[in-house]
Image (tube, rainbow, N blue to C red):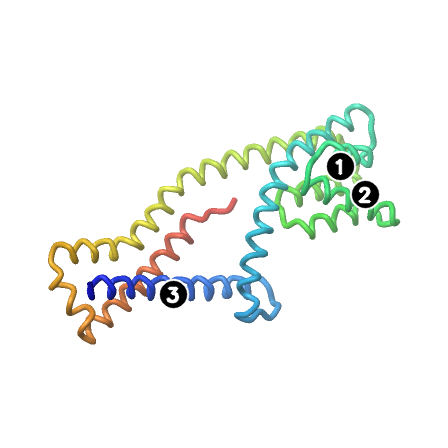
Amino acid sequence: MIIILKIFLTLLIFIFITFISFFLFLNFRIKKHNKSNYNFKKLIPKIITNYIEKQKIEKFNKQLIEAIKLVSNSLKAGASLSQGIESIINNSKSPLADEFKEVKNEIMLGISFDTALTNLSKRIKSKDLELFVTTVNIARETGGNLPEILETITQTMIERNKLQGKIKALTSQGKLSGWIVSFMPFILMLIFYFMAPELLNPMFTTFTGIIMIVFVIFMVIIGFLLINKIVNIDI
């Protein structure tokens, strides 16, 4: 019973150190990409808002491809670009419809079309949207067959999404391996408890054993973060 409690305590320590390391790692990434001053109290809300923003962008990108096709078809039918934006608002769902409605409102307030699209690109940190906005703004300045250009970038987005899906499928095994490798020492600890409990006593009753446990936990966390870094591929 005492061994079980010690193993449980070790797992709690592992989880605690994991969360602390994870928070510090995210805090480093945030400070690296943003010059604003963040402290630890602001880190947890930042993690939550980043997750919500990521989910919103993923949903936005899925809707954007169909929206660009809709604009391209509207331009082919003789409609203006503003009418194409209006068709997006009427035929799309949130969050894409809400964001383009904001573009429409800015234009009605006297902001130029190019600036309104640029503001949209600043609000939504999406590579696909940035490509769309850049293409439209350049085409408006230099001319060209905008419907055909929109069809080309739509096809590019579709191919990139397919590639991202393949990468996600290929790296899913690596992510699973990271979790398995991280928990394997503790699974083996439980196995040794049932096979030979006396082997675990020095791990909890001696200073050297405790140092070894802390070292193993630290190395497991480092290994998990490295595996997670390797398998997270952005294109």
Counting residues from the N terminus, which is met first, the one under dot 1 or under dot 3? Answer: 3
Residue 234 place in picture, x, y as percent: 50, 47
Q: Amino acid at mark 1?
A: Ile
Figure quadrant of residue 209: bottom left
Counting residues from the N terminus, which is met first, the one under dot 2 or under dot 1? Answer: 1
Residue at coordinates 36% horizontally, 56% vertically from top-left? 224
Mark 3, secondary structure of its residue: helix
Q: Are marks 2 and 1 in contact (CB under 8 Å)?
A: yes
Residue at coordinates 88% horizontally, 49% vertically from top-left? 110
**As displayed, is residue 82 above or below residue 205?**
above
Q: Which mark is residue 16?
A: 3
In depth, the one of 166 and 206 nearer the eye is: 206
Q: Which mark is residue 104?
A: 2
CA distance for labels 2 and 1: 9 Å
Mark 2, secondary structure of its residue: helix
Q: Amino acid at mark 3?
A: Phe
Q: Report which residue position mark 1 lands on.
A: 89
Answer with left or right where residue 65 lies relative to residue 203. Answer: right
